[in-house]
Image: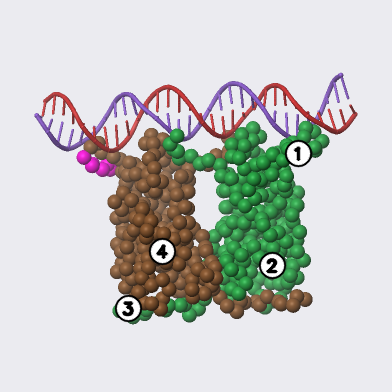
Chain colours: A brown, B green, C purple, D red
DNA sequence: AATATAAGTGGTACTGTGCAACCTAACAAG
DNA sequence: CTTGTTAGGTTGCACAGTACCACTTATATT
């Protein structure tokens, strides 16, 4: 018999929270939503910019994702954006109030839908372009690192999914979608190869309408599935 | 001023745990390590098979990953396998003892290194082939779902990383590595294309030695980096 | 020495991408 | 009405990487 049997339940429990990296495209730039920490000096990191988020409310949130959706709704008024868990970070030191673990989600919302809610707790919320490294690298807690993880995930998945489509207000044209890819990837994309690749997966529906923007009209599309992205083919000797 | 200001700290905190899907290859099959829940009827899911894991010990684990490594060391005696976080699942109902959130990691260990530790708390640990769906689909808690997530991640990443190399005892031959891919992918892989793809990334070091296994000797390799996999190239119009 | 077998190499067909030229539908200027 | 301009959309060719298959090489066995 071991000298110290592990207790059935731990005496002390960590703080559990959710943090959100909410992305949108404004003025041809990728933006992330940040909120100011309360100015109250009794709170950690007063008045600094941070990712929106908060503690799990055991009596209110049924699941982790519920909590993330609740936060998202509170801040933006959006109730069904694309939402994906990035990962969890937990340590004894990341929050001065004690051992804590947070769960990072990223959300993609079309710029049109953005209606910033006048914070329930009077907190200031603002869109910041990712270009502003002075801001995004000096966030409260370890949020700069969390944001980096979210961006890294987004960058990686854009290469082989239709994620940027969730940033486009529907209906959208193909050049608009391409621009969305270019903004997220931060590099130019070949028009012809892009079209072939997009149409190789059948995740777009033609609306039949066109958008007249001065020159030749562009065909309008909408997503066939609002809840999940399309995946472009990988390659590892897939037997034909 | 809102009627209910959110409390600075939550009154009630969830249970926080880590669960591990530890994979290895035995007898040409992918296996996962499972442990039996204590027979004590006061515990949830007594005597059922479950993923190894446990609650965070706030006084002992500095980080989430520390906790995962500690569990891994306790069960297998391995202290530096490949370890990757899959994600977190939290809900009010997944543990009868209350709101809980668990963090799923998967680990890959070479079959040679496997030394099952006679459980510190006398719990029975055993390797189970993933073929045994009767077992892997009837685990305690939501562990069947957690295991599925881990397998799904593994399956996905094998397509574009060198992960199966972490399942091979070093040094290994190229055909052995190929077999490792085939076991994880559960399909045949083309020899010639495989070699070209592997050598296109420079993550293997030739030992200079060869393994004589009856027929023509095979060159032996070891990993250049033990801590991270190699990534095979993606494709999205990377401007040349 | 002949044979069997697994390791390793080379070559061709095919497919998807990169690139660039071209066609097309609208508007605007004269 | 004609012509030029511009952005959307299409076509075709060169190239690179893969699938497939045939071939060579090194060892053990008979």
Instruction: Give how far apart the Cα atoms at labels 2 and 3 are.
Output: 48 Å
How many numbered callouts?
A: 4
| Residue under numbered circle 4 | A139
| Residue under numbered circle 3 | B2
Residue B205 x/y as whole percent? 67, 41
Q: Which chain does tag 4 point to?
A: A
Instruction: Give how far apart the Cα atoms at labels 2 and 1 are.
Output: 46 Å
In the image, which disc is placed on residue B209?
1
In the image, which disc is placed on residue B154?
none
Eyeballing the image, is B148 above or below B222? below
Residue at 82% across / 36% down in the picture? B214
Residue B107 x/y as whole percent? 64, 56
Q: Nearer the viewer, mark 1 or mark 3?
A: 1
In the image, which disc is placed on residue B48?
2
Instruction: Give how far apart the Cα atoms at labels 1 and 3 are.
Output: 73 Å
As for residue B130 lying within the magenta part, the answer is no
Residue B202 lies left or right of residue B2; in this view the side is right
Residue at 64% across / 62% down in the picture? B69
Residue at 73% across / 63% down in the picture? B125
What residue span does the magenta drawing correspond to? A208-214
Q: Secondary structure at mark 1?
A: strand
Q: Secondary structure at mark 2?
A: loop
Residue A14 lies left or right of residue A23; in this view the side is right
Residue B106 x/y as whole percent? 62, 57
Q: Nearer the viewer, mark 3 or mark 4?
A: 4
Q: Secondary structure at mark 4?
A: loop
Q: Quadrant of residue D8?
A: top left
């Amino acid at each position: 018999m071991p000298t110290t049997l592990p207790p059935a339940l731990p005496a002390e429990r960590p703080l559990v929270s959710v943090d959100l990296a909410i992305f949108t495209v404004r003025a041809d730039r990728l933006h992330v939503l940040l909120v100011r920490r309360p100015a109250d000096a009794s709170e950690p990191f007063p008045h600094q910019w941070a990712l929106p988020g908060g503690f799990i409310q055991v009596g209110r949130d049924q699941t982790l994702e519920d909590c993330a959706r609740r936060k998202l709704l509170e801040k933006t008024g959006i109730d069904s954006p694309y939402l994906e868990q990035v990962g969890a970070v937990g340590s004894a030191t990341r929050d001065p109030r004690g051992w804590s673990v947070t769960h990072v989600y990223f959300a993609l919302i079309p710029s049109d839908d953005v209606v910033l809610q006048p914070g329930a707790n009077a907190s200031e919320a603002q869109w910041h372009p990712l270009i502003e490294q002075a801001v995004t690298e000096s966030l409260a807690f370890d949020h700069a690192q969390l944001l980096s993880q979210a961006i890294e995930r987004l960058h990686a998945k854009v290469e082989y999914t239709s994620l940027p489509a969730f940033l486009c207000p529907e209906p959208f044209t193909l050049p608009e979608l391409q621009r969305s890819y270019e903004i997220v990837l931060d590099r130019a994309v070949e028009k012809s190869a892009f079209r072939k690749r997009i149409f190789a997966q059948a995740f777009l529906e033609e609306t039949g309408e066109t958008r007249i923007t001065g020159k030749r009209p562009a065909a309008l599309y909408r997503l066939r599935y609002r809840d999940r992205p399309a995946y472009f083919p990988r390659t590892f000797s897939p037997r034909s």
